[in-house]
Image (tube, helix red, strand yellow):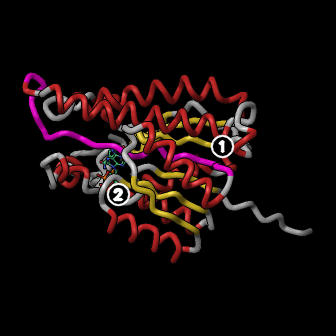
Amino acid sequence: MVKQLKPAKHILITGGSRGIGRAVAIGAGERGWSVGVNYAGNEKAAAETVAAVKAAGGQAIAIQGDVASEADVIAMFDATMAAFGPLDGLVNNAGIVGPKQAFADYSLERMKRIFDINVLGAYLCAREAARRMSTSRGSQYGARGGSIVNLSSMAARLGSPGEYVDYAGSKGAIDTMTVGLARELAPEGIRVNAVRPGLIDTEIHASGGQPDRAARLGATTPMGRAGTAGEVAAAVLWLLEDSCDYLTASLLDVAGGR
Ligand code: NAP
């Protein structure tokens, strides 16, 4: 019997330059996939990720763009599809936290920035993916269905009191979007799921002014440690694969039992 080779997938990862996004990109490269590696400002990190994807056996391009800008979002999808062809997946991963602060001290600017990037940005990217992967409306894009994986957080359930309640709420919006979009897009060949990481050892904690956060709080979890970007990436990659074709509208916790 001749073994059928699976066609390589073409995916876009927002915030693919570092952390969880980079780990997903490298895993995609190991599968021979093509990856649009979006980043906000860290050109060097994005170039390193692109090189790592290629070294792993895939194709990749770096695409600068702010997910909170509609024009940038459209341009990053255009660039990915111009380089590789029809899109098979979106990893809606770009996200930020603010500094640890009491809720009553939040500025309007802080909350707007969180919601612009984490919510509006993710919604814009999901919309663009829906337009381009839908089997009923994406014929001009060569649409053949696909998979959207949203990076939510355990914060959506825990609320992040005393740290960042705004961030937690932004991830709650991602959970709700995941379920609604999954049900709306199922007849159009698009699966939508979310991964909810717990405490993962990436630079996001330092960006919020707590570089030791993952190690410190990770030690208090049932597994007694923080997770790695690679452990989250494994779940994201599985949700992109065809082996879980019947899986949609799920919120998958990757949190060591937290
Ligand atoms: P990270 O290491 O801080 O990396 C953030 C990535 O997002 C970088 O690639 C960054 O690009 C990009 N980015 C930031 N703002 C952007 C914007 N406006 N437009 C486009 N890209 C932007 O973060 P991470 O820990 O890997 O987190 C990835 C996702 O997982 C986030 O959604 C986060 O909320 C979620 N998550 C993380 C944890 C955790 O413990 N790490 C837990 C739960 C959920 P540059 O390199 O150019 O700055």
- Residue type marked 1: Gly
Q: Quadrant of residue 138?
A: top right
Q: Magenta span covers which residues?
A: 86-104
Ligand 1 lies under 8 Å from the Cβ of mark 2:
yes
Specify the label residue 19 is tagged with: 2
Q: Measuring from the top left, give residue 187's x and y in whole percent.
A: 72, 28
Q: Residue at image x 17%, y 46%?
A: 208
Q: Residue at image x 40%, y 36%?
A: 121
In the rendered structure, the answer to whether residue 17 lies left or right of residue 204 reads: right
Query: Mark 1 highlights which residue?
Result: 146
Judging depth in this view, the residue of 203 and 119 nearest the camera is 119
Q: Measuring from the top left, give residue 41's x and y in whole percent.
A: 30, 56
Q: Measuring from the top left, give residue 129's x and y in whole percent.
A: 58, 39
Q: Measuring from the top left, give residue 65's x and y in whole percent.
A: 39, 50
Judging depth in this view, the residue of 64 and 106 nearest the camera is 64
- Residue type marked 2: Gly
